[in-house]
Image: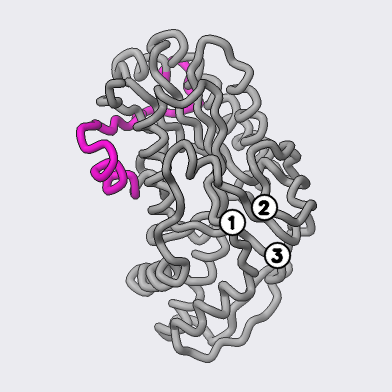
């Protein structure tokens, strides 16, 4: 099969999108990445862009991705994450029916299914417990039922790396640690619940999975669902302790009620055996390296 030459990417300027260049250079060096370049929630503008771009594949990254941001403005989260996704899918099915949509969903859609306490595979029920997870689950299910569209659905677990905003736990910790080390705030770090365990990936490994999925999109069965996970659950408090140790400074940790989420599930991890089988993908970057580079990035930024 011919490799995709023109790849329309939503969210190309976002956190994961900014890491796509090296991944595509390795896996699909002949591909041109085309930004959407319009408001995802403007269905007419999306249709015009799809018609003009004539992509061979579309990688859909754009979303209201932070749980707190989505919860703070649910209407916007539903508009972008569900209705924007459906506008894109509709435009692709009308104007480029041979193109495959590689949709980036989220492991947050599994929600209460994590209560089993073991790594989930793609057969686990979607049972979201927050607005973000609900919007991603709705889009995931809607695309799975949409006729006239080739779609591959990816469900990445938590990922971090250089360039991430502090709306996410690891990056928020690293920012505070970097500010303390630079003398910009007292040596006290405020944090939410540190007991939950999460399955963390490096964003560059995730970007490589996206490139592999686009490369093999035509060969994969329509409707394929793939988890992207390490299979290892790390306690959030241990992640914070590791960042503090990397910084080499004494820091007191205080609870921050504003960051406490009662809906937090104790343990979340994923089984990505199917991604290994169908894409040849597994994480390459060791977690200690990710943490070190997130901290270095924040030390430059502060």
- Asked which quadrant contains residue 298, the reply is bottom left
| 131 or 108, nearer to the observer | 108
The answer to whether residue 22 is above or below residue 59 is below
The magenta segment is: 19-46
Give the label on residue 119, or none. Answer: 2
Residue 39 % position (x, y): 43, 28
Residue 176 % position (x, y): 51, 74
The answer to whether residue 38 is above or below residue 300 is above
Q: Mark 2 and mark 1 in contact? Answer it, CB < 8 Å.
A: yes
- Asked which quadrant contains residue 219, the reply is top left
Q: Quadrant of the C terminus?
A: bottom left
Q: Which numbered disc flags the more N-terminal residue, 3 or 2? A: 2
The answer to whether residue 12 is above or below residue 116 is above
Left or right position of 121 against 35: right
Front position among marks 1 and 3: 1
Dot 1 crowding, Cα within 10 Å, few <14, some 14–19, many 20+: many
- Asked which quadrant contains residue 265, the reply is bottom right
Residue furthest left as drawn: 30
Q: Is 27 inside the magenta-drawn segment?
A: yes
Helix, strand or loop at label 3? It is: loop
Give the label on residue 231, or none. Answer: 1
Q: Which numbered disc flags the more N-terminal residue, 2 or 1? A: 2
Residue at position x 41%, y 15% in the image: 47
Helix, strand or loop at label 2? It is: loop
Q: Is 43 inside the magenta-drawn segment?
A: yes
Residue 55 % position (x, y): 32, 20
The answer to whether residue 133 is above or below residue 231 is above
Residue at position x 57%, y 80% in the image: 241
The residue under label 3 is 196
Left or right position of 276 against 264: left
């Amino acid at each position: 099969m011919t490799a995709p030459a023109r790849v329309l990417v939503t969210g190309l300027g976002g956190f994961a999108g900014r890491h796509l260049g090296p991944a595509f250079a390795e896996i699909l060096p002949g591909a041109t990445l085309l930004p959407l370049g319009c408001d995802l929630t403007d269905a007419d503008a999306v249709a015009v862009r799809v018609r003009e771009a004539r992509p061979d594949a579309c990688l859909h990254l754009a979303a209201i991705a932070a749980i707190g941001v989505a919860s703070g403005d649910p209407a916007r989260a539903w508009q972008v994450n569900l209705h924007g996704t459906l506008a894109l899918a509709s435009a692709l099915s009308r104007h480029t029916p041979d193109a495959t949509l590689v949709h980036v969903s989220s492991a947050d859609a599994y929600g209460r299914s994590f209560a089993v306490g073991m790594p989930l595979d793609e057969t686990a029920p979607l049972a979201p417990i927050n607005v973000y997870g609900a919007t991603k689950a709705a889009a995931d299910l809607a695309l799975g039922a949409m006729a006239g569209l080739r779609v591959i659905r990816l469900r990445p677990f938590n990922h971090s790396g250089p360039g991430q905003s502090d709306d996410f736990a690891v990056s928020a910790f690293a920012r505070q640690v970097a500010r303390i080390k630079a003398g910009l705030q007292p040596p006290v770090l405020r944090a939410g619940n540190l007991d939950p365990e999460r399955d963390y990936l490096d964003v560059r490994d995730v970007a490589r999975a996206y490139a592999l999925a686009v490369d093999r999109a035509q060969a994969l069965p329509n409707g394929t669902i793939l988890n992207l996970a390490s299979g290892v659950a790390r306690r959030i408090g241990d992640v914070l302790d590791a960042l503090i140790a990397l910084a080499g400074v004494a820091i007191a940790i205080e609870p921050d009620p504003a960051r406490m989420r009662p809906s937090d599930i104790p343990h979340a991890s994923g089984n990505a055996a199917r991604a290994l089988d169908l894409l040849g993908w597994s994480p390459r970057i060791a977690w200690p390296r990710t943490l070190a580079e997130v901290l270095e990035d924040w030390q430059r930024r502060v």
